[in-house]
Amino acid sequence: MDIQENIVNKVAASGLITFNLEDYLDKGERVIYDIKDNLFHGLILREKDFRDFVKSHDWSQYTGKNVAITCSADAIVPTWAYMLLANRIRPFANEVVFGSLEVLDTLLFQKALSRVDVNSFAGERVVIKGCGDEQIPVSAYVEITSLLTPVVKSIMYGEPCSTVPIYKRKD
């Protein structure tokens, strides 16, 4: 008898579906636009100077990028200034948000995951892959868990050979 005949791949036979969040990672470059560089003496935004800057700046450098607009200085910046930046960057950028790179990643994953046909996972046992080559924000794990919970039989975290149970529907 051949020893190969007795080897059974239990993971393959388990019927588990692996959901890899890396498949939904936006590969575009992420950059921060920090409005602190536009502040007079690092304290205030002078409207005329700022508007002149906005008119003359080459916004095309943001083409295809994901941009987070923020202010790292302890200054009061009027809301319209952020709106003006978004207006000028948006025609070039893939995405524009107010906040940190973490906020940007959260939004990018929310958009990508909103396009997932969760009904295709109805009644299935799903493993949300936990290890990989890319850094995935916790917010993405929370989002996909929220989306899948109403339709799946179970959700696990990790790898098919080593999972942590997250949810099991009570039948």
Image: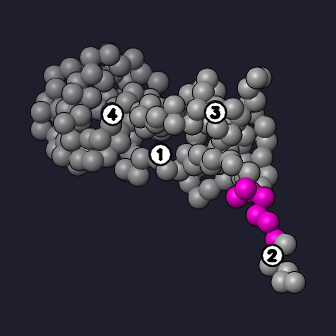
Q: Residue lying farthest front?
A: 1
Could you say whether the residue bearing mark 4 is in a helix, strand or loop?
strand
- Does the rendering let one see residue 36? no
- Relative vertical location of residue 139 with respect to residue 20 in this rendering, above or below: above
Residue 123's label in the rendered image is 3
- Relative vertical location of residue 45 with respect to residue 24 in this rendering, above or below: above
What colour-coding does the image apply? one colour
Residue highlighted by disc 1: 24
Does the magenta run of residues contain 48? no
Callout 1: 10 Å neighbours few (<14), some, many (20+)?
some
- Relative vertical location of residue 159 with respect to residue 59 in this rendering, above or below: below
Which is nearer the N-term, disc 4 or disc 3?
4
Which is nearer the N-term, disc 2 or disc 3?
2
Q: Nearer the viewer, mark 4 or mark 2?
A: 2
Find residue 64 and report its horizontal and vertical position in percent: 27, 47
What separation in Å lies between label 4 and label 2 (alpha carbons)?
56 Å
Say which quadrant the C terminus sits in.
Answer: top right
Could you say whether the residue bearing mark 2 is in a helix, strand or loop?
helix
